[in-house]
Image (cartoon, rainbow, N blue to C red):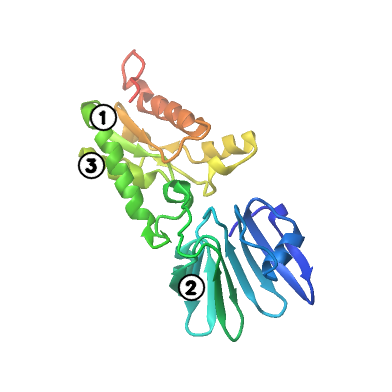
Amino acid sequence: MTTNTEARGMVRCGDVHVAYCLEGLVIRPLDVCRLINNEAGPLQYTSLIALTSNGELIAHRPIAGLRNLVLGAYGFDLAMISNESSAIGALGGEVRTFIRPGSTVKINRLNLTIRNYLGSSRGRLCALEFIYLSRPDSEIDGHSVYEFRRALARLLAKRLADRVGDIDAVVGMPETGIIYGLKVAEALKRPFEYALISIERRRSALRKDILDRLASVHLKLSPVVSAIRAKRILLVDDSLLTGLSIKEASQVLRHSRCERGACGGGQPKDS
């Protein structure tokens, strides 16, 4: 779980010290203690993972679902909790269960307990988890993120079917737009060109500072000119928040495809 400095800390809850991190709405340290001590009901919009000084591992997934939480194990005596199932696999563990919305999991040396506040209700899932936030090799509540993105790309391709004659090649925005671009190209029977190369691994859409976001966008927009010169390009991205990334990428592609006069005297057409 990745959080900012305001959403993680240490607090003393009775006789134990608790290290915790939060995702979603930041709550007070007192509310962290109340949740850990079973003195409060489920949180609405805050995920929590905590480790106590007496060796207890605690996780809470809020009613609204928010980020996915997964319980895994390595062998018989090591428990893992993550908001990405792929992280558990990367550590050599196995996914045991997906923690349901409105549930608190407590694990100590002797047992594991799961308290569900919603009964049989499954709560809600965050669509942005499937579309953008999660790694493609993860699962959310047992549903493959990759399969979701492939199906979504096919739906997008259907909407573009009447424009296929205007497309010479498909380019995906790095890194999270690559899968969508590949599958759209496959459905439209057009070549996919890996024409934008990124040296930036952090998500530009999640940056708060506009200058930081601009710098991140430019770091993932290095063009492969030979792959797009004089071609009509369909540019595919997975999300549109401020429009900054797609605007910058469009300008880069327009300039690159017309280098050395390859487009003649006119301006390249939008595609």
- Within-10-Å neighbours for mark 2: few <14, some 14–19, many 20+: many
Foreground pick, 239 / 39:
39
CB of mark 1 within 8 Å of CB of mark 3? no
Q: Earlier in the sequence, mark 1 or mark 3?
A: 1
Q: Which mark is residue 72?
A: 2
Quadrant into which the N terminus falls: bottom right
Identified by mark 2, the residue type is Gly
Identified by mark 1, the residue type is Ile
- Within-10-Å neighbours for mark 1: few <14, some 14–19, many 20+: some
Q: Earlier in the sequence, mark 3 or mark 2?
A: 2
Q: In this rendering, which labeled residue sits more in front, label 1 or label 2?
A: 2
Q: Which mark is residue 167?
A: 1
Foreground pick, 208 / 50:
50
Q: Is residue 244 left or right of residue 270?
A: right
Foreground pick, 47 / 166:
47
Task: Give the residue drawn at x 55%, y 79%.
Answer: 112
Q: Is residue 79 above or below residue 99?
A: below
Identified by mark 3, the residue type is Ala
The residue tagged 3 is 187
- Within-10-Å neighbours for mark 3: few <14, some 14–19, many 20+: some
Task: Give the residue drawn at x 34%, y 13%.
Answer: 266
Q: Residue furthest front?
A: 119
